[in-house]
């Protein structure tokens, strides 16, 4: 017996489209794990990047052990000795992207306009607190770097399906009908650490947003286009903020 597909009439397609409710979903992913996630990946929270092992914590980067008892006298002394942190143009920095083996190339290229950049792994290690931070500072010192710049980033997406989404999943009509709107936002956090004495500061550049409509056959390319666009914008803003905040 031969099975034959019958193309639905235009009236039936319209009725299907009108009967389908719009769907929405929200998700968050790291800039270091920013590959495309299909429907099943969102549902089961699986990562497309097998090398991604999580993020560095602030405690690891700045050298704070939350289990060590702190006295009020120590806090007072630290505040009294506080000095302005600077980062002159042309100085050497060790750049780390939390969660990534190497920082994203657009961030490296952007910062190289202002600084001498050495890259370092941001994959979490078993060490924590002061030991890890001291190891980072020693590595930076051996590389001739005056400051360590570490950045974290989140990509937040909200997806809304149009009524035509049901139509685009039928094999006859195909996946070329725009059926989903994806709004995406990127937020960065940047830490600057003095290699010599461990002083540090953190800031967050301006967040950026983008919206794109896609069809089934263009879903992945549309998603990754948004990721690239927002990363470039955010990295440019982070570099400009570094210059404005810390130049002498």
Image (cartoon, rainbow, N blue to C red):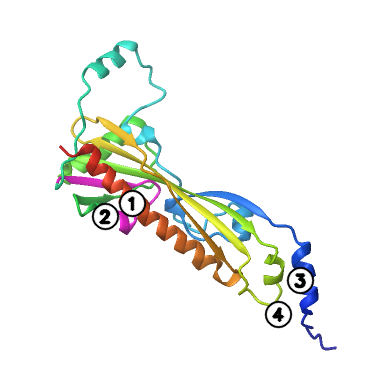
Q: Can you say which quadrant of the picture contains the C terminus?
A: top left
Q: Residue 69 location, x and y as percent?
A: 38, 17
Q: Nearer the viewer, residue 239 or 140?
A: 239
Q: Residue 245 location, x and y as percent?
A: 24, 38
Mark 3–mark 4 CB contact (< 8 Å): no
Mark 4 lies on residue: 172
- Mark 3 and mark 1: span between their CA atoms? 44 Å
234 sits to left or right of 25: left
Secondary-structure class at tag 1: helix
Q: Which residues are magenta?
A: 91-110
204 sits to left or right of 76: right
When the figure is inspected, residue 162 is found, relative to residue 128, above or below; the finding is: below
- Mark 2 and mark 4: span between their CA atoms? 46 Å
- Nearer the observer, disc 3 or disc 4? 3
Mark 1–mark 2 CB contact (< 8 Å): yes
When the figure is inspected, residue 168 is found, relative to residue 49, above or below; the finding is: below
N-terminal of the pair, mark 3 or mark 1, is 3
């Amino acid at each position: 017996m031969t099975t034959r597909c019958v193309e639905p009439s235009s009236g039936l397609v319209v009725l299907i489209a009108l009967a389908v409710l719009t769907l929405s979903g929200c998700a968050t992913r790291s800039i270091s794990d920013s590959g495309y996630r299909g429907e099943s990946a969102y549902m089961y929270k699986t990562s497309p990047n097998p090398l991604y092992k999580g993020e560095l914590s602030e405690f690891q980067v700045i050298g704070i052990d939350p289990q060590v008892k702190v006295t009020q006298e120590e806090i007072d002394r630290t505040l009294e000795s506080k000095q302005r942190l600077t980062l002159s143009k042309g100085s050497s920095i060790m750049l780390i992207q939390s969660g990534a083996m190497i920082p994203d190339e657009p961030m490296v290229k952007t910062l190289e306009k202002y600084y001498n950049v050495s890259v370092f792994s941001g994959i979490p290690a078993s060490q924590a607190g002061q030991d890890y931070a001291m190891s980072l500072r020693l590595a930076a010192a051996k590389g001739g770097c005056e400051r360590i710049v570490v950045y974290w980033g989140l990509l937040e997406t909200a997806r809304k399906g149009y009524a035509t989404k049901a139509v685009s999943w039928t094999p006859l009509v195909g996946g070329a009908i725009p059926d989903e709107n994806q709004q995406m936002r990127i937020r960065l956090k940047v830490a600057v650490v003095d290699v010599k004495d461990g002083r540090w500061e953190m800031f967050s550049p301006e967040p950026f947003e983008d919206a794109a409509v896609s069809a089934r056959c263009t879903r992945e390319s549309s998603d990754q286009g948004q990721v690239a666009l927002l990363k470039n914008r955010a990295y440019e803003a982070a570099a400009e903020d570094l210059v404005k905040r810390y130049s002498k």
